Amino acid sequence: MSIRVDYRASLSLVGTVLKYLSVPLLLPVVVALLYGETLAPFLPTIAVTLAVGWGLERLAPEPDIGNREGFLMVATTWLAVALVGTIPYLIEAHGIPLLVEPIHPGSTLGNPVNALFESMSGFTTTGATVLGSINVTDHTRGVMIWRQLTQWLGGMGIVVLAVAILPELSVGGAQLMDAEAPGPGIEKLTPKIAETARVLWGAYLAITVVEILLLYGLDLAGMAGPNMNAYNAVAHGLTTMPTGGFSPQARSIEAFSAAVQWVIIPFMVIAGTNFALIWQAVAGSPRELFEDTEFRGYLGVMAVLTAIFTGLLFTGGFTSGVPEGATFDAAYLQEYAATLSGSLEPSIRHALFQTVSIVTTTGYASMDFDVWGAPAQYVLLFAMFVGGSAGSTGGGIKIVRWIVVAKVLRRELFTTAHPEAVRPVRLGGNTLDDRAVRGIMAFTLLYLAIFFLGAVVLFLDAARAGIDFTVLEVISGTASTLGNVGPAFYRLGPMGGYLRFPDSSKLFMVGLMWAGRLEIIPLLVCLVPEYWRR
């Protein structure tokens, strides 16, 4: 069988991306120097990325890519960067034989499977963690800022960044960006695709810097709480805009003041908004933002969910007891039940924060929502499937797809009652062609099928390993990893983690996160035999 895909060209471009991944690795190097920490986790990582990248580039010095090569390059790039991202974690735990002593030998990331899980969770902006302890005592500040940085790099897209700065990728940039960008498609904002990529990343960087300055400003004003400082301002700025959710604080955003929580909310909303709309609004067409069907639906869903959660919290909708293995105790439950019940501002704040965090798939937590009652938790589970806007950094199915699904169902009901009627599906005043509609329906069905299959696999694997997970834990964990949300419920909740899963389940969830970030199709298409044949 002759192979139609020029895999050498794809791997050559993967090498180019890896080679330049050594540049952002300088940030944790700078942080380590500032805090007097060892550079051992990063200098070998830089050397490996340069060497492997250079070696892969030699496979095809002048690569020429089409759609097939673009799919392979994008899928392989995300796996490659996740593998490279494990190196600092492994060196911190094990050191380098005969050269470097282990820095924190007790780190749970010393297990290569755990390290890969954490790295893939970072680059795919999932935010699910297998860290046994989350702080800058059991891990160096350099390694923890690398953990944050993986999410920032993965947010707008590593390949989109490469298209923006590397001339050798600009020729096939449209195929690469379409294969990587979240949502049904990426809007071309400028005549040249490389310029569009630079615009997207420029806006992404600018908004990140604004958030960092605001968070640090709250600290200087004494309004952020004792845990906020310059380091945490940068760390959380790096994981808000990519809708990532990693935090150097074990208690996530609960570790900070109400003022910090209010500041972070609008940035999560922005992160879940189509960046093309944001660009148009900034460029002088703010009406485009509020006339957009998806954006109105996005705000509407969050408004409805916030109202539901506010009502439940205000009226005391908390769990009646502390379940076995819970990440909270009776004192914590009583404290929040007393603080929120009958109090409007904290009820609205926590309801809005968690709604925005879950819908946009950021995964931050302003409190341990495992203390919420069952009705609120099931609504949160629903929110995990909503997703942000197309063209945003959010994961999930995406608002625009749900709008189209609803319109298709409505059309089917109408044409059932009126068989001779012709009723096209319209979105924002434009008629969608049947191919686009079929693609959206197929993706949504495929997403749900993978979710159900994934939940069964995880439940059976946990049972095989003798680990007792509840049905809600497994279902929410599957939805969270496939949708790149991060936290799930109970022991997988915002103050817990995925460490208890067997290694086989963790590797399966690595695949779910990988597929979810690439929106399934670019990864699955590479597994179809016809893709490789002439």
Image (spheres, grey):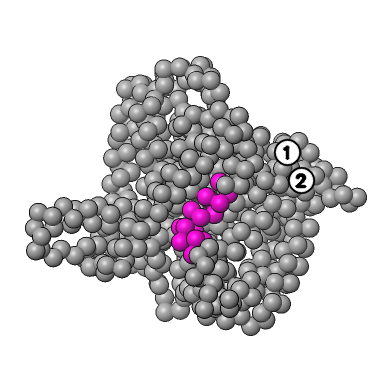
- Amino acid type indicated by mark 2: Glu
Circle 1: element type: loop
Q: Is residue 287 above or below residue 384?
A: below
Q: Position of residue 132 (x, y in %)?
A: 66, 34
Q: Residue at x 25, y 60 (%)?
A: 291
Marking on residue 92: 2
Q: Specify few, some or many for label 1: CA neighbours under 10 Å numbering under 14, 14-19, or 20 or more.
A: many
> What residue type is disc 1 on?
Ser
112 magenta-colored:
no
Label 2 Cα neighbours within 10 Å, binned few <14 / some 14-19 / many ≥20: many
Q: At x 28% / y 40%, what residue is drawn?
A: 304
Image label count: 2
Q: Are marks 2 and 1 in contact (CB under 8 Å)?
A: yes
Q: Earlier in the sequence, mark 2 or mark 1?
A: 2
Observer-nearest of 216 and 479: 479
Which stretch is magenta? 509-525
